[in-house]
């Protein structure tokens, strides 16, 4: 079991290093080339630039410099990559040869690890859906038992069940994160759409605020008002996240076209001195979305904008992380003098690998979504019915207490609050599971939680209110009996 963190950083770093390793270079020349990289990739490659400084200015051996720098890297996959590179160089292997070997090894192992991790994540999702049903029926069973058998402490049992829900939620979420880490398909660079960047940056705060507000509303207000307010909070969060989600829906269709487009660009640019001519050739016969992007690049080039800036600004403005990464690899490699056709082959493989993994993640996430919404909704409905039945039963017991020794010790308010807190926790956990498995964006996480909270709270309110109204209409004689007592 391995923490991946932002695995895309390591994959981007490895793809770029492999793109630069298309020619036979000595170790120092290769590191000088890597250290000259700017932009987004330059930030990821800082450890190698630091190793170059230790090698050139402080007399470190190259292998020792790489291993020394590796200990300061936060990302575990990047740290392991730099450390292995240092050991290989110390053993006498050239850095270019190691990068070529490691790139193929990383592609193969990455596919196998992701497939295994998705299998584990799917099992954890199934386990949690089973636990939701189990805990729901435990709540119902002990609520009924506490109203009949006075020896059972309903309050204690209900709090233990709530603790079980919280503990199992933390356990399943933590293990899923350990297997899959976090990833995103959305770019948040300076050229990305403003509103998409804003939602991605503020979504975690909005999510935390929504969870806190929902918990406070169900703890401090009466159950029906609390569930209505909780549903309203879910609706507000859904509307906030949907504004970015609607824009990001175009990203998968765009990403599917990227491998062919960047391969064609890199091949054609090798035959033209003027990039405008190359882009004009590639744009012919492309889908409308791609053709518009290439026309924007051509327009910027005609206006005197440098190729790298034009490619970065146009492809990053789509909001696609893959488009941004691919343009970074291509323009940085060409800026450093690497043949474009060699870069194109690496970009093509990188994009296809990422798209293949994303497709598998989406399939598992779709399955979990298809199970999570009905599970949480059914649990909310059962809790709403059981809560209403218990409330009516308490009213009946007060009228016959001197004849029947029934004395349930479970306060009605506590029961309602435990149920509503459980609904919030289950909605949050299911949203986190789908988000971690799908690897989409923070806006998707907020959207999933908001929609689950809205649906489950609304179902709870309708079932509890409807059950109470139905049973009171069927037992209208209770009101007449109350007047007699």
Image: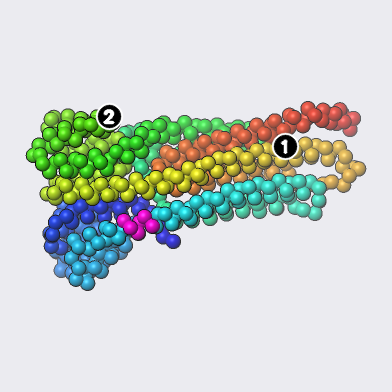
Question: Residue under circle 2?
Answer: 288
| Magenta span main SS | helix
Colour mapping: rainbow
Residue 57 is situated, as x and y percent measured from the top left of the image, at 14, 64
Q: Is residue 477 above or below residue 322?
A: above
Nearest the eye: 419 or 94: 94
User: How much space separates mark 1 and mark 2, taking CA atoms?
Assistant: 57 Å
Task: Tell which residue pokes out farthest to the front in this image.
Answer: 285
Q: Is residue 206 above or below residue 82?
A: above
Question: Residue under circle 1?
Answer: 388
**Helix, strand or loop for disc 1:** helix
Residue 375 is situated, as x and y percent measured from the top left of the image, at 59, 43
Magenta region, residue range: 107-112
From the image, which quarter does the C terminus lie in? top right
Residue for point 39% across, 45% down = 359
Q: Residues within 10 Å of mark 1 (few under 14, many from 20)?
A: many
Nearest the eye: 101 or 473: 101
Task: Tell which residue pokes out farthest to the left in this image.
Answer: 273
Q: Is residue 436 above or below residue 254?
A: below
Residue 223 is situated, as x and y percent measured from the top left of the image, at 66, 36
Residue for point 70% across, 30% down = 466
Which comes sooner in the sequence, label 1 or label 2? 2
**Helix, strand or loop for disc 2:** helix
The answer to whether residue 16 is magenta is no
On the image, which quarter does residue 18 sit in? bottom left
From the image, which quarter does the N terminus lie in? bottom left
Q: Is residue 55 visible?
A: yes
């Amino acid at each position: 079991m391995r923490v991946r963190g932002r695995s895309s950083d390591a994959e981007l770093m490895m793809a770029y290093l492999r793109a630069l390793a298309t020619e036979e270079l000595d170790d120092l020349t290769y590191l000088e080339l890597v250290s000259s990289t700017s932009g987004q990739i330059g930030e990821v490659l800082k450890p190698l630039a630091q190793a170059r400084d230790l090698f050139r200015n402080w007399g470190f051996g190259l292998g020792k410099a790489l291993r020394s720098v590796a200990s300061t890297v936060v990302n575990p996959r990047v740290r392991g990559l730099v450390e292995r590179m240092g050991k290989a160089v110390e053993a006498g292997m050239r850095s270019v040869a190691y990068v070529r070997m490691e790139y193929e090894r990383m592609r193969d192992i990455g596919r196998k690890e992701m497939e295994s991790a998705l299998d584990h994540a799917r099992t954890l999702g199934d386990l949690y859906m089973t636990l939701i049903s189990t805990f729901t029926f435990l709540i119902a069973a002990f609520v009924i038992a506490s109203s009949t058998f006075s020896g059972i402490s309903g309050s204690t049992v209900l709090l233990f069940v709530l603790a079980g829900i919280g503990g199992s939620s933390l356990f399943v979420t933590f293990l899923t994160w350990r297997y899959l880490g976090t990833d995103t398909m959305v770019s948040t660079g300076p050229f990305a759409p403003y509103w998409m960047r804003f939602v991605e940056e503020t979504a975690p705060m909005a999510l935390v605020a929504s969870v806190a507000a929902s918990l406070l509303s169900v703890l401090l207000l009466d159950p029906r008002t609390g569930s209505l307010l909780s549903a309203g909070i879910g609706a507000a969060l859904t509307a906030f996240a949907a504004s970015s989600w609607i824009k990001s829906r175009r990203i998968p269709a765009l990403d599917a076209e990227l491998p062919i487009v960047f391969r064609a660009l890199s091949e054609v640019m090798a035959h033209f001195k003027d990039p405008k001519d190359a882009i004009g050739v590639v744009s012919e016969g492309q889908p409308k979305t791609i053709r518009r992007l290439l026309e924007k690049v051509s327009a910027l080039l005609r206006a005197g904008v440098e190729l790298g800036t034009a490619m970065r600004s146009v492809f990053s403005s789509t909001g696609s992380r893959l488009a941004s990464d691919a343009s970074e690899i291509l323009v940085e490699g060409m800026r450093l003098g690497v043949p474009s056709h060699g870069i194109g082959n690496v970009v093509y493989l990188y994009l296809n690998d990422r798209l293949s993994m994303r497709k598998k993640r989406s399939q598992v996430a779709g399955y979990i979504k298809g199970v999570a919404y009905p599970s949480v909704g059914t649990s909310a409905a059962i809790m709403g019915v059981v809560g209403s039945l218990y409330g009516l039963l308490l009213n009946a017991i007060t009228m016959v207490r001197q004849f029947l020794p029934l004395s349930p010790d479970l306060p009605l308010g506590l029961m309602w609050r435990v149920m509503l807190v459980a609904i919030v926790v289950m909605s949050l956990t299911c949203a986190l599971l789908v988000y971690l498995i799908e690897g989409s964006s923070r806006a998707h996480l907020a959207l999933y939680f908001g929609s689950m909270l809205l649906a489950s709270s609304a179902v709870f309110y309708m079932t509890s209110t409807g059950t109470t109204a139905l049973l009171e209409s069927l037992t209208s004689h209770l009101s007449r009996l109350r007047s007699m007592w």
